[in-house]
């Protein structure tokens, strides 16, 4: 029996009182022996231990890392506050049993792998274990946990359980994934930019050569009417026109084509093309259009946007050889800073999204990575040039927008185009009337072209119409001719020239 005694000086001490019966040799009770022991030191030690225990519990509970202790059967003995916050389960819910593992890892196959890690830690076959798991929280959300665990032994070396420390690395893993995605987007952007420069340079040179071939074949046809060579010249001209179509597509991809920018209503574009798109996709594919009311306006070349929509439709049709559904949708969207930071070349702001979605065969990641490259195609030889999607890519980029593709094998494909919204009213496509008769004779025209063969062809064609022609190889010659105050009716200038391009020259004049 423990009591507190007051000493003569008034102080108190804790004592342990032990009473024992005193018996004689016959077993008869003769009295009681009372022993009183001063247990002040023991009580002080117990208080120190209690304070230390409370101190350790405070440390454990205030640690910002998940800490749990299991006994040798895997039952939860200690479950700190961080474990409660990360998992969503309170210590009262998990204490004294091992069902928590089934709650955290509901998938049987995954649970067995986790339990094998726990078993290794309990058995102590390895001094320390480090591994990662994905837990299912009480609210159904997931977290990625990085674990460090080791077995616990008593003073005799007997295994009595394990301690596990878990760190929530969900956000770092998410950040790593986003960084990897950005790096991949940047690499892809750099690759497309390099291909674009190469393709644009080649296309520009070929375009000039094909212009000469087409022009001189046309001139020859005019001179050799009813000649035996006429049929050959017609075939040369046709081949040059087909080749010129390819170079125009390459110029579109490299964003070097001339575009007539207008304020557009994408809903109107889709409605105007709907009948033609139905003919393109055939009877086996159903077309659905979901067009938002009061859709914002965008600025682009209407003919080029129609080409984008047609190219994406053809691509979708070819991805559904057995039929399916094609969905074209328009909607206003606002892109915030967070989304923009996760996507290369995207700026926050107000956009109009045009999406083309099919239920076709989908794409592998390898195909998806190269889908916008010129001449890349998964179609058999002879079906397509591989320039349809690269042309669409270039048109969208030249319009100040972005195009993204989302696809999985067997899950279909979605192309999403984001074009910046503008506050202007949509323009109607009204043909402009020519204000002046350009077939007047003896009028002066200035031709500015750095490519000699193209310049000579242009001069020859205009001279045939009776015009007086002034030639300039570059901007300096053009300025010098204009300073002579010749009565020049018209200036024809190349757009792409060294030092000063065509538009800059016209501004200077």
Image (cartoon, rainbow, N blue to C red):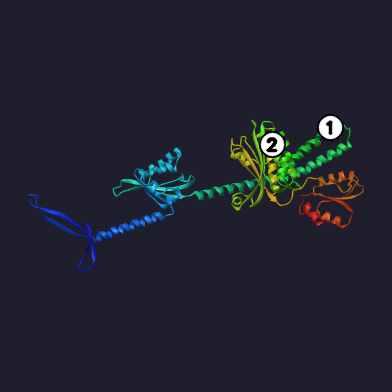
Residue visible at 51% across and 48% down in the picture: 173
Q: Is residue 72 left or right of residue 203?
A: left
Residue 164 position within the rendered picture, expressed as x and y whole percent measured from the top left: 40, 48
Residue 303 falls in which quadrant of the image?
Answer: top right
Quadrant position of the N terminus in the picture: bottom left
Q: Residue at x 33, y 56 (%)?
A: 53
Q: Closest to the observer: 219 or 98?
A: 98
Q: Is residue 365 above or below residue 509?
A: above
Q: Is residue 198 visible?
A: no
Residue 496 location (% of width, % of height): 76, 49
The residue that label 2 is drawn on is 314
Q: Point out residue 236 in the picture as x, y percentages from the top left corner.
A: 80, 35
In what element is the residue under mark 2?
helix
Farthest bottom residue in view? 9
Note whether residue 49 is visible: yes
Residue that carries the numbered disc 1 in the rendered image: 231
Q: Earlier in the sequence, mark 1 or mark 2?
A: 1
């Amino acid at each position: 029996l423990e009591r507190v005694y007051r000493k003569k000086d008034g102080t108190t001490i804790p004592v342990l009182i032990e009473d024992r019966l005193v018996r004689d040799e016959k077993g008869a009770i003769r009295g009681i022996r009372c022993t009183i022991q001063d247990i002040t030191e023991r009580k002080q030690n117990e208080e120190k231990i209690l304070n230390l225990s409370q101190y350790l519990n405070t440390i454990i509970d205030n640690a910002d890392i998940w800490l749990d202790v299991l006994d040798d059967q895997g039952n939860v003995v200690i479950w700190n506050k961080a474990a409660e916050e990360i998992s969503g389960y309170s210590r009262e819910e998990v204490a004294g049993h091992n069902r928590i593992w089934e709650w955290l890892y509901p998938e049987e196959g995954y649970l067995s792998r986790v339990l094998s890690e726990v078993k290794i830690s309990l058995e102590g076959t390895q001094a320390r274990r480090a591994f990662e798991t994905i837990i299912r929280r009480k609210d159904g959300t997931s977290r990625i946990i990085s674990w460090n665990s080791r077995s616990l032994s008593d003073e005799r070396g007997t295994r009595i359980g394990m301690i596990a420390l878990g760190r929530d690395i969900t956000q770092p893993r998410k950040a790593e994934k986003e960084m990897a995605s950005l790096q991949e987007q940047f690499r892809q952007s750099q690759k497309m930019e390099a291909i674009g420069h190469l393709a644009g340079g080649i296309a520009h040179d070929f375009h000039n050569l094909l212009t000469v071939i087409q022009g001189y074949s046309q001139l020859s046809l005019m001179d050799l009417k009813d000649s035996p060579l006429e049929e050959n010249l017609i075939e040369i001209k046709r081949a040059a026109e087909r080749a010129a179509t390819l170079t125009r597509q390459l110029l579109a991809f490299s964003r070097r084509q001339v575009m007539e920018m207008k304020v557009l209503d994408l809903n109107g574009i889709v409605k105007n093309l709907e009948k033609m798109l139905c003919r393109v996709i055939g009877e086996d594919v159903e077309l659905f259009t979901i067009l938002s009311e009061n859709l914002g306006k965008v600025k682009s070349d209407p003919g080029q946007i129609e080409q984008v929509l047609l190219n994406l439709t053809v691509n979708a049709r070819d991805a559904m050889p057995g039929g399916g559904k094609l969905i074209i949708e328009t909607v206003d969207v606002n892109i915030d800073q967070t989304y923009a930071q996760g996507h290369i070349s995207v700026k926050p702001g107000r956009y109009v999204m045009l999406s083309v979605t099919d239920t076709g065969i989908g794409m592998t990641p390898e195909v998806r990575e190269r889908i916008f490259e010129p001449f890349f195609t998964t179609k058999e030889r002879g079906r397509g040039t591989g320039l349809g999607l690269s042309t669409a890519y270039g048109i969208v980029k030249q319009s100040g927008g972005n195009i993204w593709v989302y696809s999985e094998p067997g899950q279909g494909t979605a192309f999403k185009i984001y074009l910046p919204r503008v506050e202007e009213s949509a323009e109607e496509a009204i043909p402009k009337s020519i204000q002046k008769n350009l077939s007047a004779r003896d009028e002066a025209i200035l031709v500015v072209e750095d490519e000699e063969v193209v310049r000579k062809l242009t001069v020859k064609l205009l001279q045939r119409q009776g015009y007086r022609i002034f030639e300039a190889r570059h901007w300096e010659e053009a300025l010098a001719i204009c300073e002579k105050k010749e009565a020049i009716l018209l200036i024809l200038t190349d757009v792409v020239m060294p030092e000063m391009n065509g538009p800059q020259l016209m501004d200077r004049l």
